[in-house]
Amino acid sequence: MKKIAFLLNDKNIYSAGIKPFVDIGHGLYKLGVNPYFYALGIDNETFNNLNRIFSYLNIIKVNNINEIVKSIKANNIELMISDDFLPRLKFLYKIKKETKRKTSSFIQLFYGTNTINNINKKSFKFWIGSFVPWKHLTYEYRTLLNLTDYVIGVSYSTSYVLNIFYSIYTNGNVYSPVGVNFEKFERPTINKKE
């Protein structure tokens, strides 16, 4: 099995940049895989909560991309995964360039759709945005997604929307475990086959 790592980067443990990946990591751990998690720019309280709840996972706090690159090379990580939030896609691309490792984006946010949602609202910014062609508005997002090795949808609907709006096909869908309650969490046990 490949050694994989996730980029965690958000404000709290329930946010889109953390919870789905920790849920998937928990599921992988139950299958006998122990992924790495690089917590970039996460405050100490969130990091401590993650380590308290998921003490059996490899969660490493890093301050910059260089620390991630060094750790990826030292731990021989083969696949780095992040979500499709534009700043994290940029981090992922930098990591790919520096490490020459495969990368994957977990699609859950859809850059640019807030412009569509807000066109009818009385916001000058979104009114002006409604005149920008969609291909120009989403160029950087589409380019960065196309530079990843794998694009994973969070559902079939997500993959369909990604294809219709951005002309990008996914490599498959991964449904993250639902209902992992961080407050009532128990350490899983692994039955090792002998």
Image (tube, helix red, strand yellow):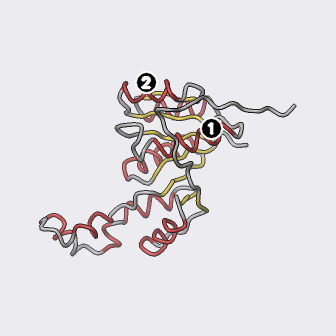
Front one among 101 and 113: 113
Q: Which mark is residue 178?
A: none
As shown in the figure, which amino acid type bears the numbered disc 1? Ile
Front one among 134 and 94: 134
Q: Which residue is mark 1?
A: 77
Q: Secondary structure at mark 1?
A: loop
How far apart are labels 1 and 2 at the CA level?
24 Å
Q: Secondary structure at mark 2?
A: helix
Q: Which residue is mark 2?
A: 48
Label 1, residues with CA under 10 Å away: few <14, some 14-19, many ≥20: some
Mark with earlier residue (1, 2) = 2
Q: Quadrant of residue 46?
A: top left
Residue 69, compared with residue 119, is above or below; it is above
Q: Quadrant of residue 127?
A: bottom left
Q: Are marks 1 and 2 in contact (CB under 8 Å)?
A: no
The mark lying in front, picked from 1 and 2, is 2
Q: Position of residue 133 (x, y in %)?
A: 29, 75
User: In which quadrant of the rendered image does the N terminus lie?
Assistant: top right
- Report the residue at 35% width, 66% height from top: 138
- Left/right of residue 158 with respect to residue 41 in the rendered view: right
User: In which quadrant of the rendered image does the C terminus lie?
Assistant: top right
- Report the residue at 60% width, 49% height from top: 102
As shown in the figure, which amino acid type bears the numbered disc 2? Asn
Label 2, residues with CA under 10 Å away: few <14, some 14-19, many ≥20: some
- Report the residue at 57% width, 39% height from top: 5
Q: Position of residue 63 (x, y in %)?
A: 40, 29
Residue 81, compared with residue 57, is above or below; it is below
- Report the residue at 51% width, 28% height from top: 53
Find the residue positioned furthest to the right. Answer: 194
